[in-house]
Amino acid sequence: MPAITASAPGKVILFGEHAVVYGRPAIAVPVNEVRARATVNADPRGVPGTMRIQAPAIGLDALLADLPDDQPLAAAVSSVLSMLEISRVPACTLRITSTIPLASGLGSGAAVSVAILRALSAFLGQPLSDEQVSALAFKVEKLHHGTPSGIDNTVITYVRPVYFVRGQPIQTLQVAQPFTIVIGDTGIPSPTAITVNDVRSLWGEKTAHYESLFDSAGQIARQARQAIESGRPEELGALMDTNHSLLQEMGVSSPELDRLVSAARASGARGAKLSGSGRGGNMIALASPDTASLVANALSAAGAYRTIVTTVHSK
């Protein structure tokens, strides 16, 4: 049996992070320049029911049976077997690789889950639908993030820009005019669960204030959707700047993120903001195709660990 490989892109949130957890809209887009890959190889000499999982990036090389149920990679595998009602997997090896930085806001966990779900279900001869993949990936996301919004698994599964409101049907965005985003990585890991829980604590202490911040962030996301779908992406820059100020007030920015945001604006970006949970991870800047390299160079000079230039389009 030939090896079966599946891959999934990273993602970046354009607008609405944190507020999306509280029912406000958010916009996220796939980042195809970085990807997670899962490959399943049959092991004809192996004992039936035995799967070895290898993930060199995290130093993992173990049998599925030896991993705890709440280990995210094992949970992704088990969710496929459960959905397909398979009690014993054919002897095989699952190998996971990824170019998506860990704990950086680029959706590494969700991308790995989606790649595993697709590769393993195809290996077992019963490929899962997008809806099934997204639902199972969301369950695994709960192990990564505690109370995820669902936006990561959605945009990564469907590989489309999405307008996401928790608990509502998926809405994909039609990008009337492609636009360029420069991503700057601080190189500082930022576990989403910790920041989300901290914001929840602050929201509990200052509910009215945080609800106002979330309302403002939601309104920005709605305006951004109109700009994207009507072919006015240049308007996103000012919206990014305002959204970043709101995130600063929520307490989720950091000196490193603020420095990169300032550097991007000074180099000619039309706007910039942190992206994701904050306190590390990534920021994004709106640039033109002609200025993207200048913005990327300015971010590197300001201390960015890496930069990624991506174009946002409908698909």
Image (spheres, rainbow, N blue to C red):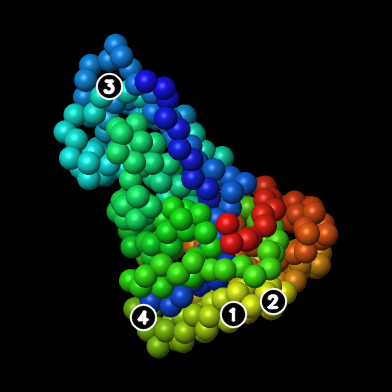
Which residue is labeled 1 in the image?
226
Residue highlighted by disc 4:
205
In the rendered view, does 114 fall on the left or right side of 238?
A: left
Q: Amino acid at mark 1?
A: Gln
Pick the quarter of the image with the N terminus.
top left
Dot 2: element: loop
Regarding residue 199, the answer to whether it shows in the image is no
* Residue at screen point 49% across, 45% down: 8
Label 4 and label 2: CA atoms lie apart by 39 Å
Q: Residues within 10 Å of mark 1 (few under 14, many from 20)?
A: some
Of callouts 4 and 1, the N-terminal one: 4
96 or 2: nearer the viewer: 2
Task: Tell me the mark number nearer the camera, choosing from 4 and 3.
Answer: 3
C-alpha separation, residue under disc 1 versus residue under disc 2: 8 Å
Q: In the rendered image, which residue does mark 2 sit on? A: 232
Q: Are marks 1 and 3 in contact (CB under 8 Å)?
A: no
The one nearer the camera, 232 or 96, is 232
For the residues labelled 1 and 3, the Cα–Cα distance comes to 51 Å
Query: Is 273 left or right of 162, judged from the image as shown?
Result: right
- Which label's residue is closer to the chain start, 1 or 3? 3
Residue 273 x %, y %? 63, 68
Q: Position of residue 246 (x, y in %)?
A: 56, 78
